[in-house]
Image (spheres, rainbow, N blue to C red):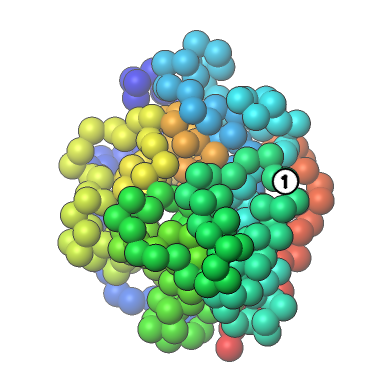
């Protein structure tokens, strides 16, 4: 299907690896105002990717081509019959998590996270994942906010909502960041691959927000992830199309689009046109690409199409969370 999507601009001479020299970027590489602007772009990017991808969620690439040619506009519809600019559980759970963290003074507390997710589920959201629902019902019955470990809970539901942790832990030690990731993730997804993906995403978002290049992040984050968890290998395998909710396929699709395409819009259009769990691949790609490319890279027409209340909530929460310690 890649040959039928000629609209995307690939990196010239790109082989799937970013080869520029890499050195660690200091946390102060960007001035504070620019850090906040990139944090805002990450949150808006998540919502834009969610709203864009939801239209083609669960469609195959061939079905997308048949109905849309190349899907590139926020128009709603899809199997959820969304209004244009409406978001799904990816953004909804992120906002619920962010509110819980702010209510606890910037701390990621498992019980507070579980209560926030439970309140969100009780609000009858338009969509909710099976693993999230099952483990929140377990929490209601047991009062224990930490799910039991399960090899079967390697879905993408914890990773899709992890952005608030990335923003609130800016400037904290890596050990503190990883602990905060697990505190929210294991409410519904207590699984090693889910943990690895959540921690990778949070640290990568932080690197981008504070000024690291894609080449630096490839060396510092992406390569170590694949070395430690070969399941996530993506750069020497065929294009990951129709990705499922399995976190491995989600990360593979997102990283292929992020590494192989230039620019925010090209990255998101590429990843959602792969179909499958497109709202979540779109949301995760959006938060990474937003953190990397910044506010100016977000298409104005997409921002205008996004639900105004969601637009404002994402902006406000990003700035409330992203205050370095």
145 or 61, which lies in front? 145
Vertical arrangement, residue 18 with respect to residue 31, above or below: above
Whether residue 98 is visible to the viewer of this picture, yes or no, is no
Quadrant containing the C terminus is bottom right
- Residue 118 at x, y = what percent? 65, 60
Up/down of 309 relative to 118, above or below: above
Q: Could you tell me how many numbered marks the image carries?
A: 1
Q: Residue furthest top?
A: 66
- Of 72 and 317, nearer the camera is 317
Q: Is residue 172 visible?
A: yes
* Residue 56 falls left or right of residue 47: left
Task: State the image coordinates of residue 284 (x, y, percent, origin top left).
Answer: 49, 50
* Left or right side of 169 for 309: right
Q: Residue at x 35, y 30 (%)?
A: 241
Q: Residue at x 67, y 52 (%)?
A: 121
Residue situated in front as seen by the camera: 277 or 168: 277
The N terminus lies in which quarter of the figure?
top left
**The image quarter in which residue 194 lies:** bottom left
Q: Position of residue 97 (x, y in %)?
A: 63, 65
Is 145 located above or below residue 276 in the figure? below
Q: Residue furthest right?
A: 309
Residue at 49% x, 28% y is: 58
- Report helix, strand or loop for mark 1: loop
Residue to which mark 1 is pinned:
124
């Amino acid at each position: 299907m890649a040959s039928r999507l000629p609209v995307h601009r690939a990196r010239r001479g790109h082989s799937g690896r970013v080869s520029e020299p890499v050195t660690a970027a200091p946390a102060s590489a960007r001035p504070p105002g620019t850090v906040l602007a990139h944090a805002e772009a990450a949150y808006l990017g998540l919502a834009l990717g969610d709203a864009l991808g939801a239209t083609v969620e669960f469609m195959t690439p061939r079905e997308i081509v048949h109905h849309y040619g190349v899907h590139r506009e926020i128009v709603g519809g899809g199997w959820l019959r969304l209004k244009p600019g409406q978001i799904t559980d990816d953004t909804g759970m992120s906002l619920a998590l962010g509110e819980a963290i702010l209510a606890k003074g910037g701390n990621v507390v498992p019980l507070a996270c579980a209560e926030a997710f439970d309140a969100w589920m009780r609000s009858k959201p338009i969509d909710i994942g099976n693993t999230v629902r099952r483990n929140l019902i377990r929490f209601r019955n047991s009062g224990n906010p930490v799910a039991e470990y399960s090899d079967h809970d390697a879905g993408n539901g914890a990773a899709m909502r992890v952005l608030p942790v990335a923003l609130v832990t800016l400037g904290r030690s890596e050990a503190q960041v990883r602990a905060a990731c697990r505190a929210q993730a294991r409410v519904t997804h207590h699984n090693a691959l889910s943990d690895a993906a959540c921690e990778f995403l949070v640290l990568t978002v932080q690197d981008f927000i504070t000024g690291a290049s894609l080449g630096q992040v490839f060396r510092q984050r992406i390569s170590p992830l694949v070395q430690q968890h070969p399941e996530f290998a993506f750069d020497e395998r065929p294009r990951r199309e129709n990705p499922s909710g399995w976190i491995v396929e989600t990360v593979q699709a997102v990283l292929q689009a992020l590494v192989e395409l230039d620019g925010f819009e090209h990255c998101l259009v590429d990843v959602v046109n792969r179909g499958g769990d497109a709202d979540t691949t779109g949301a995760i790609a959006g938060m990474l690409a937003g953190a990397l490319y910044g506010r100016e890279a977000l298409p104005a027409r997409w921002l205008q199409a996004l639900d105004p209340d969601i637009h404002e909530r994402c902006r406000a929460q990003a700035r409330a969370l992203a205050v370095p310690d």
